Structures are given as C-alpha cells and as structure tokens.
Image (cartoon, rainbow, N blue to C red):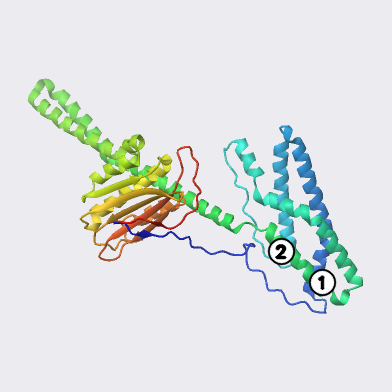
Amino acid sequence: MMEHLTTAAAGTARTAGAGPEDARLPPPGFALTAGTWREIVHLLGNLPMALIGFVYAVTVLSVGSALTVTVIGLPLLALGLAGSRQLGRLERARARTLLGVRVAEPTPIPVLVGGRRSRRLWLALKDPVGWRTMLYDLIRLPWGIFTFTTALVSLFVLWPVLPFVARGLTNVDRVLVRALLSPSEELERRIRELESDRGFVVDTAAADLRRIERDLHDGAQARLVALAMGLGLAKEKLLEDPDAAAVMVDEAHGEVKLALQELRDLARGIHPAVLTDRGLDAALSSVATRCTVPVKVTVELPARPAAAIEGIAYFTVSELLQNISKHSGARSAAVDVWRAEGRLLIQVWDDGRGGARLDGGTGMAGLADRLDAVDGLFVIDSPEGGPTTVTAELPWWDREGHRDRTGRSPVTRHP
C-alpha cells in the first residue's frame, strides 16, 4: 500500500569565509611588489593588534568572571563579548585590505523587542561570534610577537627572500581569520531560513485570521442577523396572526440549526475538539469518515507529540483527504502515521488517476510551505495513472517542548 520513502538533504556548501571568493594571489617573487609590501605591513601590525586584543580579552574574562557573584558580572561579560565583536570586525577589515581575504560579516545579534532582560542577556552571553573572536585574541599574542620579529629582522637580513617569508607567514594569518573570524555558513544559512519561515508563518496566520473573519461575516453572522429580524417580526405578529408567527418561529429555529452547524464547521477548521481530547488517531479517523472514498487510518505513535506538531499533522492529512475527494477519482485511500528516527512521518495513499503536483492548484504548495516553516519535508510521488503517495515529515517535539534530535535515515513503509 505504501511506497518506499527516502529522505535526502540537498544543498550546497561553501568555504568558511562565506563571502565573495578571495582574489587569487600572485606567486611570490624576489621583487618587492605592492602585494608583498601590504603583507609586510600586516605582519608588522600583528604585534600591536595582538597586544590590544590579548589585554582586552584577559581583562574582560578575568573581571567578568570575578564579578559573576554580583549582579553586574554577567552583564559586564555580555558587554565585553559585544566589544569583542567590534575587534573582530576590525581584524576582518585589516585582513581584507592587506591580505585580500574576503570574509563575510556575521549576522548581528537579534534584538528582542519587549523580551525579558534575562533572555536578552542569555542571547548575548552565548554569542558564538563573540566567543570565537575572544579565542582569536587570546592565541594571537605569541604569533603576533613571532611574525613582528621575523618580518622586522627579514627587512634587514633576509630581504632577498622576504616575499617568500611574508607569504608563508600571512598564509597562516589567512587560515586563522577564516577559521575563527568567519561566520558559520551552516548557522548563517539556518538563520536566513528561519527568518524566511517566520515571515511565512506570520503571513499564514494573518491569512487564517482573515479567512475566519470572512467565514463568520458571510456565514454564521449573516444567519444570526436574519434570525434576529425573523424573531422580531414574529414577535410583532404574535397577537395579530399567531399562525403566521408560529411559521416564522419555525423558520427561525431552522436558521438556528444552520448557524450552529456553520459554527461547528468553523470551529473544526480552527482546531477540532476531538484532536485536543483524544489525539491524532481519533481525529484522523473522524476526518476519514467525511472523505468520499473509503479510507484506512493507521496511527502508530508511542506518545502524543506537541500540540503544534499534532495540529499541523491533522490539517495536512485533512487537506490531502479533501484533495482525494475532489480531484483523485480514487476508489480507496489510506493514511499511515508513525514515528521513526526522531521524526513524525505521515503517508497518504490513494489509487486515483495520479498527476498531483506542487503547482497543480490543489493547495499542495501551501502544505509544503507550512511544513517547511517548521523544518519539515513534503514529498509527492504521483505518476500519471496513479497511484499517488504523499509523504510528510515533521520534527518530533514532545508535550514538554523537547525536540528529539535523533539522526534521520531512510524509512520504508511496506504495504
């Protein structure tokens, strides 16, 4: 019944200096070219910059650590890490100007508007860019003394081979800058994804609110207004024409039933009570009964996931079953839900005509975007003529809000 599923992460990886590619350096020669002089200036500047960075790092770490027993210790350490970021910016600019090393600037620490002070402080204290710059400043002093001395002596004693010496020493500097002062490519990529996903989630929430408002205005609200008017007219006719008033009250009773049904449908579309009370198994079985084709539901979960993950799984299956009812022409369908390798997996299968695509106008693209916003995956296998297998993956979060970060591997579901 179910097809083989293989999840594969695809992406591109770049070098640690996640910026424009470094210009290719010309090979060193015996002549002192402009590039060689820039490298010599960089080596001579290593000692004063290393002294500044070392004194700053030792002062911040010693004073901040000593004062952690007071209320000013941790804020002082966070402020020191912010200053360390600025020293890193200066070193990147020096390497870019004198060594031709193109290193992208790291993403600034996000500003939490209205957030708690303790959370803002913790965000500053665990800043990886600040700590790596601090490490760079601590280990640079011996190297700065060595490069300054070697470059100065070579200017007077080893000047015929000075370009080769300068190139060898500055290559070590280039490695240090890329290793410790470059932003993490994976971290930066993840930040960009989360920013994009956050915008999508906000837009989706706004669209859902507009949909609910529109459904209330056009559906239940309009019926309740008509009901109020009908009851008002029935009240006026109650003494003059009791029979007509009875008919109007009977019509109002029918309007009440329709309004209640629309409100129940709307509430089910927001968050069904059966999902909250009994979990995915009962909720998906209820959804399956409304499908126009027979659906077999199998839910094999050791425990209930977090409410947010549970809700996304429910609405994903609900949307897919609606598509089966409207577009597939299937005679039977099946829903499988299980947990494997730290993921919540969902497969919806039908024996319909196939040909389902993300750009087919059936809401598949919206489902893929919703899952992508929570680090999920959405895969369609639907050849022309069928059958169709749609697989969705969601991260597993438990009810206490802890994520299972077990590694992922290919998962197979057999008929």
Q: Which mark is residue 175?
A: 2
Instruction: Residue at 82%, 55% (x, y): give it.
Output: 141
Outermost residue toward the bottom in this view: 30
92, above or below 305, in the image: below
How packed mark 2 is, by other alpha carbons closer than 10 Å (few <14, some 14-19, many 20 or more), is some
- Quadrant location of the C terminus in the rendered image: bottom left
- Say which of 410 and 334 sits in front: 410
- Say which of 241 and 332 sits in front: 332
Q: Is tag 2's residue or tag 1's residue first in the polypeptide sequence? A: 1
- Quadrant location of the N terminus in the rendered image: bottom left
On screen, residue 100 versus residue 309, left or right, reads right
On screen, residue 350 versus residue 31, left or right, reads left
The number of callouts visible is 2
Q: How far apart, in angstroms, are the residues tagged by discs 2 and 1? A: 16 Å
SS at badge 2: helix
Instruction: Residue at 75%, 40% (x, y): give it.
Output: 64
Q: Position of residue 30 (x, y in %)?
A: 82, 79
Q: Position of residue 119 (x, y in %)?
A: 60, 38
- Say which of 380 and 90 sits in front: 380
Q: Amino acid at mark 2?
A: Val
Q: Position of residue 3 (x, y in %)?
A: 33, 59
Do tag 2 and tag 1 residues touch (Cβ < 8 Å)? Answer: no
SS at badge 1: helix
Q: Amino acid at mark 1?
A: Val
- Say which of 94 and 134 sits in front: 134
Q: Which mark is residue 370?
A: none
Which residue is identified by label 1? Answer: 165
Q: Is residue 56 visible?
A: yes
Instruction: Residue at 17%, 30% (x, y): give it.
Output: 253
Q: Quadrant of residue 116?
A: top right
Outermost residue toward the top in this view: 239
Q: Position of residue 74 (x, y in %)?
A: 70, 38
